[in-house]
Structures are given as structure tokens and as C-alpha cells.
Image (spheres, rainbow, N blue to C red):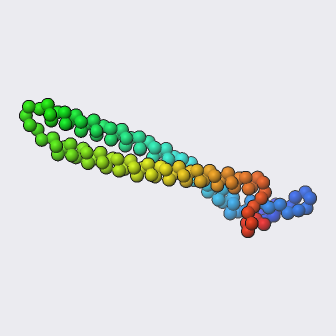
């Protein structure tokens, strides 16, 4: 049996390039990382959804506090609380933007992994390797 990186011989006696250990390792690594990237992407998506819901709740609470403040006959100073809520909302929006950027990077990474996996699989199936490949 031919070892990784060595050439096999076809029935006609001509050498046929086989996958190298490096190619097999890269393929395995890509397949190993794919579920982790997909799971991370789904978690980021869930956090983004909760951040949007939290932002909406903060907006509703701030509106309600303004309304209560206007309806009160006794002057209550709710402005500091409203400012704290708006500051919290700003931070939620900032975190949401960071998560959105991370999710976009994960999406691109997942796409690259899938593309590279398909390219390597096609090369392995066709037996064609790029020039300078150690499998020659």
C-alpha cells in the first residue's frame, strides 16, 4: 500500500498522484472546524436577537418614564434614570454592532472553509494537483 504523499500506480503502469498527508490533514482540519464555526455563528445570532429585544425594552421603559414624569403632579426627577437607560441602550447598540461584525466574519470564514473543502475534494476526486504540489 502506498504511503501518504507517494504515487500509486494505475493498471496501465503510469503513476497516479494520491492525496498527501498535508492534504488529508487540511481536509480533516476544515471538517473539524466547520461545526464549531457554525455553532459559534448560531450563538452570535441568538445573542444579537436578545440584544435587539433588550434595546427595544430599554426604549419602551425610557418612553414610559418620560410619560410618568410628565403625568406626575409632584415633580419627580426621573431624568438621571432616563439618562442611565439611554446610556445602557447605547452600550447595547455598541455590543450589537460588535456581534454583527463578528457574525459577518464567521459567515465569511464558514464560506471560505466550504469553498476550500469543495476545491480540495474536487482536486482529490480528479487526481489533478497544482504545480509544485508534494504529491507529484
Q: Is residue 15 visible?
A: yes
Residue shown at 11% from the left, 38% from the top? 76
Q: Percent position (x, y) of residue 125?
A: 76, 52
* Apparent side of residue 120 relative to residue 15 in the rendered image (left or right): left
- Residue at left 19%, top 36%? 66
* x and y, in percent, of residue 39 in the image: 51, 46
Which quadrant of the figure contains the N terminus?
bottom right
Residue beneath the point at 30% across and 48% down: 90
Q: Residue at x 33, y 40 (%)?
A: 54
Is residue 134 in view?
Answer: no
Say which of 20 and 128 sits in front: 128
Is 60 in front, or is 1? Answer: 60
Q: Nearer the viewer, residue 69 or 114?
A: 69
Give the quadrant of the C terminus. Answer: bottom right
- Outermost residue, left side: 74
Q: Report which quarter residue 58 is drawn in.
A: top left
- The image shows residue 17 at horizontal and vertical percentages of 80, 61
For residue 93, above or below residue 9: above
Please state if 66 lies on the left or on the right of 46 as rendered. Answer: left
Number of numbered discs on residues: 0
Extreme right residue here?
12
Q: Position of residue 74 (x, y in %)?
A: 7, 34
* 122 sits to left or right of 40: right
* Quadrant position of residue 24: bottom right
Amino acid at each position: 500500500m502506498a504511503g501518504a504523499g507517494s504515487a500509486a500506480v494505475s493498471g496501465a503502469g503510469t503513476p497516479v498522484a494520491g492525496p498527501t498527508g498535508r492534504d488529508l490533514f487540511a481536509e480533516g482540519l476544515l471538517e473539524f472546524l466547520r461545526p464549531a464555526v457554525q455553532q459559534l455563528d448560531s450563538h452570535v445570532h441568538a445573542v444579537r436577537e436578545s440584544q435587539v429585544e433588550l434595546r427595544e425594552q430599554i426604549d419602551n421603559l425610557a418612553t414610559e418614564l418620560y410619560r410618568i414624569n410628565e403625568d406626575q403632579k409632584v415633580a419627580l426627577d426621573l431624568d438621571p434614570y432616563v439618562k442611565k437607560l439611554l446610556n445602557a441602550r447605547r452600550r447595547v447598540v455598541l455590543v450589537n454592532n460588535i456581534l454583527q461584525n463578528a457574525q459577518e466574519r464567521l459567515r465569511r470564514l464558514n464560506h471560505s472553509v466550504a469553498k476550500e473543502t469543495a476545491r480540495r475534494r474536487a482536486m482529490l476526486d480528479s487526481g489533478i494537483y497544482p504545480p509544485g504540489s508534494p504529491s507529484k
